[in-house]
Structure formats: structure tokens, C-alpha cells
Amino acid sequence: MSMLFDEDAELDDEFVSAAFASDDVRAMEKPLLESGVPLMHMAASAVAMSARVMMARAHVSPDDAQIVLLAGGGDNGGDGLFAAAELADQGIPVTAVAVGTSLHAQGLAAFERAGGEVIVLDPRAAITGHEAPADVEEAQEAFDEALEIAENANLIIDAMTGIGLVGALRGIPAHVAAELGRESGLPESMALPKGESLGAFPLVLAVDTPSGIGVDDGTLPGPYIPADVTVTFGAMKPCAMLPPSAYACGQLVLVDFDFDTAPFTPAVEAMIPRTAAQMIRMPHIADSKYSRGVVGLITGSQSYPGAAVLSAHAAAVSNVGMIRYCGPTRAEDLVLREVPEAVMGQGHVQAWVVGSGVPSAEADENGDDVQRERIRTLLARYDATVDGSADMPPIVVDAGALDLLPETCTSQVLITPHAGELARLIAHRDDDAAAAEVTAADVLAEPLHWATRAWEITGATVLLKGAITVIVGYDEEGESSVVVSGSAPAWLASAGAGDVLAGTLGAVLAQGADTLRLFPDQVGLHAAVGAYIHGLAAQLASGSMQSGWNRPVVYDPADVLGFFSDMLPITHSPEHAHYLQGSLGQPITATDVIRDLTTAFSLLIRMYDDHDEDDAGDEDLIDPDEGPDDVIDAEPDDLGDDDDADDDLGDDDPDDDGGVYLDADRDYTDEELDELAKKLLG
Ligand SMILES: NC(=O)C1=CN([C@@H]2O[C@H](COP(=O)(O)OP(=O)(O)OC[C@H]3O[C@@H](n4cnc5c(N)ncnc54)[C@H](O)[C@@H]3O)[C@@H](O)[C@H]2O)[C@@H](O)CC1
Ligand SMILES: Nc1ncnc2c1ncn2[C@@H]1O[C@H](COP(=O)(O)OP(=O)(O)O)[C@@H](O)[C@H]1O
């Protein structure tokens, strides 16, 4: 069966790609807690196991490990304390630092039973059995001691705050975060494939959410601690998908609590290969070039003819039947040289792309740019108050055309600003006095807020570009709907990449024309598909395993080995293994991205082919489980130097293919699991 329509795999995909607001997550937890499901213990076990995997990955033996738990006074701290108790029970020393005035009582009791040490920082704390500092001087000493231990640890488990955070961190937690994490601003870490660190200690494991990040709005409102791994419970939270907070989450681990999510609407959804593959147009037997989609482009100008070439070429190779180009003669000539298939001049189209490489009003000093005039005339027909505007084909409005938008646009207008362009658009059009001063830095700090604001004041579907691109469009009821796409490596941030995106978006909208006529609210979803494919092509072109957002690893306590192998760092792109080594790939240009757009489509189209049951749910298109499978299928000799241990630990495979298998009927000791982890993690 085609993996695209495998129901179980589809459910797995929904689980990892839909994020819910914290109030909804609390409502999902409620019935389970009321019926006595031990959610906190399940959460804690996942944290303890993830801590062990992180140690194994960093080649830290559990015997030598130094772990510090930062524990807040809420349930997040409770998760941390139970996890620390599990680790301490396994012989790994953990020091807990109480950052608030209390600690979760049962969690603390379990931790004490396991022999854990507690340092209390707040003089006002009342924690039975643990003295609070008597005065400011003692408090400073305790703070310095805790800091020193934390800075010298191998691993910090950050359980100060989770979904109960209100506003920016304050008080002692804020000081702790500023010292151990960041005082403010965006994470500065290098773009590494799965958010892994460069091997520097301490590693940070965040419990549910990194402390200090805006859980529902994705902001970084004050001090916070960027994580290498974030283990999140029950459902994804918006902060793990939205920029900039998602950049502070590192690798995501999602623990399944079997929530009933059906009554809730996701706050944010992430574009994933399955959705992208389902939404691109497959060829029909009776297709013509017109039915496959025609894109019309009014891009490029006398001054910037290159944008015409990039946008037209990208559209032409993005699964459509035809492109039409309108522009100055010089740009037409250049387009024809690169894309001889292009038809010059206007005609019937299923989607428009306008504005890339067209001067803005400011840049068009004489006010006589012909492209601007063409676009102005066309865009006037998308004014929501004009008759027939609802029947216009979708239109991508990029760069220089952003200042030509009508007062109120229809939803099929897709605007594609980067942060600077969005700030300018809002400053010009928003009546709100505060908005007049908005800058690109403001937009980067609160992308969801400002993209939503642009959606409100223009009526257009908004695609705000970045490492994670945020798309604010419409749902069936006309409310806002948010989708993100983070498939691109940071190498994509290069001149002309936006022109390529505009062309790709136009092509995706043109091939979706039939659907969009029936469901005009799906422009945002199509836009996210276009952004996803554009990013995927950049991944292919650069051979990079890095991207703005990575699919979370799902933690299943019944499949610990599967979890270990899913947590393996991927070190190279198999697609490019023949010439590229390493995981970061190489720098690329916008033209390189165009070259790989067809392959990006083919990776998605391939998902329509029949697959073995086992393949269903395979997610990362470029690393289809190559690393983990290689390890699992390897001969025992490849797994470690002790053959006997393999025989002892792994069950004999029925087909005797030399793999290592867990015996479902057997309880493994922690030492045995460690041994297996060591082998798998090399
Ligand atoms: N409800 C449940 O049963 C479950 C909850 N879980 C955990 O519980 C967490 C939510 O627990 P809570 O509701 O107790 O909330 P949290 O523990 O996330 O946060 C509350 C704590 O943070 C402090 N705090 C809040 N805002 C602050 C600020 N601005 N500056 C400094 N300190 C601040 C509060 O004083 C309090 O100590 C989840 O994130 C998750 O980790 C898990 O155990 C799974 C099950
Ligand atoms: N750090 C990043 N990681 C991944 N992709 C990025 C990053 N920064 C920008 N991008 C992407 O690169 C493209 C840049 O577009 P744009 O800024 O319009 O460039 P130009 O105007 O030169 O064509 C967009 O698709 C954007 O999403």
C-alpha cells in the first residue's frame, strides 16, 4: 500500500505536526489525571531515558556522569524530581537546585529516597527537611555554589517552568537562566543538523519546554535556557514549532500520553512530507498543459532582470504545464535563454506571481516602472470590495509589489515578505500608533504576532519568511489558521532565494487551482507546501541535514531500542553520500535550489508508490532511516567488540539475519539497556 494513505502513519504524523495551546493541553490531561493515569511518572521516565541517551551520545559513562536538576515549585519541577529520582536510583548522582519557594512534595520524597542532594536558593523557601539560606549573603553563596556545580556538570535538566510559565522569567529563575542560558535575544548557536551541540558541556535537557520561552506565542520574552533536547509531554506546544522559541528547543522528543485531541483545534501545524505529497498535483491521464496549471509572472525589471529568470525558472520546474512571462524586453530575453519553454506575454493563468525584482515605490524614483503599472492594474482586481474579486486566481505578491496591495485583499492574495518587508508594510498601513515604529527586529522577535497583524489589516494570506516560515491564512470559519514550514537549511538565506520561492509558490497554487476554487481557505496550506518544497530543494542542493525545524522523535516506553536509534545523530545525507561527507553540507545559491526543485517534487511523488508496511510512517525524506537501520541491521561484529554481550542481550532473530532484537517478554536491567545503547550509539 502507498505509505501516503496508511492510517496509522497518518495518525503518527498528526501527532507530531499539530501543536496545541497550553490551556487545551491542560484540558486534554484532565480526564486522564482524573482516572488516575500516572502522567507524571510517565513523563519522568521519558526524561530519565532521554538523559541517558544524551549521556551515551556524549560518551559520558553513567558511572562518571554529573547531573544537575533545576527544579521549580510546580508540576514541571515534579517531573524533574521524579526523573532525577530514577537516575539516582540507577546510581547516577544528581544534585537538585530548588529555584522557587517550594518543591513538588511527592517528587521530592522520591528524590530523597534515591539519595539525591538538594540546594535551596530562595531565602523565603519552605521545603521540609532542607534549610533555606538564612540571609542574602547565604543566598548568594548558595547561588554561586549551584552555578558552579551546574556549569561543571555534564547535563543540566531544566525543570524550572513548563506550561505554567506566566510572562518572562522573574526572580531567581531569571538569574539562573541568565547565567546558564541567555539573558535575552535569539539563540546564537551554529546551525547543526539536529540541534546538537558542538560537544560542549553542560548539555541541557528541557522538561516539557525550555524555561523562559513563550509557550503559546513562540517569543523569547526574557532570560531562557536553550536546550539540546526538549522532552515534551502529551502534545506539541506552539513554542516548539514557532520561531524564535523553536530554535531554543533543540531536538524534540514527544511523549505519547494517548490524549484525545479530536475536540481541540491545533494552534499551529507544521508542514510535513505527507501533507505536501497529498497536496501537489499528480498527472491525470487526460491532462493537457493547461490543466496541469499555468503560472503567469510579472517579475523582474530593467534594474533587476535576474529575479525574472529565477522566479520564472523555479515556476517552470515546479510541476506545472506552462509558464507565461511579462516583463521588459531585456528580462524576456534572459528568461527565454534560461527557460525556452516560457511563453511571453499575458494570457489565461491559474496563478500569478508578481513583484520579485520589481522596484518598490521608494526605489522607483521616477514612478514610471512599467512592471509596477502592470501589477497595480492586476492587483486592483483583488480588492475585496470589487465585483468578481473572489473569482480571481491566486496571486503571489512579493518584494516590490507589496506596496501595491489594495486596501482590503481577498484571501487568494498571498503576500511573501521577509521580516524587513513585513515591518515596512505594517508601518505604512497599520492605523495603530505603536505599529508605525515597528522594525524588522520587532518582527523577528514576535513573528506570529506581526504576521497575524498583517493578516488582519490586509485580509491577505501572509507568508513570513525565515528559517521557520510562518504562514497565517484562513480556516473554514474565516478565523486565522497558522502553519509553519522549516524544511530549509540556513544555507538558503542567500540573494534570490526569495525569487525562487515566489516562483515555486505560484506553481503550487496553479496546480492546486481546482481545489482552491472549492476551498479558497486553503491558500495558506498550499503556501506552506510551496515553502516546504523550496526548503527541501535547498536541503538537496546543499546536502545538508540541517533545517529550521525537525520532526520530533516519539518516545514509546515499549520500544526503547527504537527510541535509541531515532535519537542517533544523522551524519550525512544518503542522497548525496557519493560526494558529500558530513552533515552540514555546503553553501548554495538560489540557482542551485532551482536545479533541485524537480528532485524535491520527485521525493514527494515517490510517496505514492507502494511500500512495505514497515516503511509506512518513515518521515525524513532525505534520511529515510538510513542511519538507524544500518546500525540495527548490521552484523553483530559491527555493533561492538563484545560478541558474547550481543548474544546475551539481543534475542536471536528468528530469521537469523544477525540483527539485535529486544525480547518483549523479558525485563532488561539498566546495565543491559546501557550496553545496548552504547552499541547503538557507537
Ligand atoms: N498536569 C499534569 O498532571 C501534568 C503536568 N505535567 C507537567 O506540569 C507542568 C505544568 O505544571 P504547573 O502548572 O505546575 O506549572 P509549571 O511547573 O510549568 O510552572 C509553575 C511554576 O513556575 C513558576 N513561575 C511561573 N511563572 C514564572 C515566572 N514568570 N518567573 C518565575 N517563575 C515562574 C511558578 O511560581 C511555579 O513554581 C507541565 O509543563 C509538565 O511539565 C506533567 O507532569 C504531565 C502531567
Ligand atoms: N536561517 C535560515 N534558514 C533557512 N532558510 C532561511 C533562513 N533565512 C532565510 N531563509 C529563507 O531564504 C529565503 C530568503 O528569501 P528573501 O529574504 O526574500 O531573499 P531575496 O529577497 O534575496 O530573494 C526565504 O525562503 C527564507 O525562508
Image: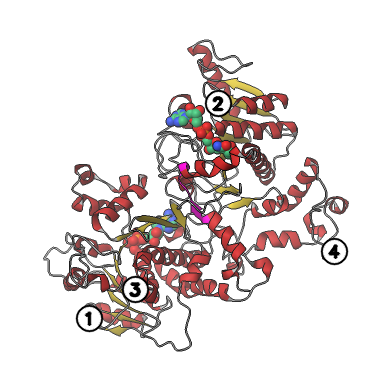
Number of the front mark, 3 or 4: 3
Nearest the eye: 638 or 284: 284
- Between the residue at mark 1 and the residue at mark 3, the CA separation in whole angstroms equals 34 Å
Question: Does the magenta-highlighted stretch encompass residue 19?
Answer: yes
Tell me which corner region of the image, top left, top right, bottom left or bottom right, holds residue 64.
top right
- The residue wearing badge 2 is 147
Identity of the residue drawn at 64% across and 28% down: 107
> Residue 654 has which mark?
4
Is residue 465 shown to the viewer in this render? no
Which element type, helix, strand or loop, lies under badge 3?
A: helix
Which element type, helix, strand or loop, lies under badge 1?
A: helix
> Residue 588 has which mark?
none
Q: Locate residue 20, reporting x and y percent.
A: 47, 48
Nearest the eye: 546 or 169: 169
Dot 1 amino acid type: Thr
Does the closest atom of ligand 1 sit within 8 Å of the Cβ of label 4?
no
Which element type, helix, strand or loop, lies under badge 2?
A: helix
Dot 3 amino acid type: Arg
- Between the residue at mark 1 and the residue at mark 4, the CA separation in whole angstroms equals 70 Å
- The residue wearing badge 3 is 517
Dot 2 amino acid type: Leu
- Between the residue at mark 1 and the residue at mark 2, the CA separation in whole angstroms equals 66 Å
Which quadrant is the N terminus positioned in?
A: bottom right
Asked if the residues shown at circle 1 and circle 3 are in contact, with their CB atoms under 8 angstroms apart, the answer is no
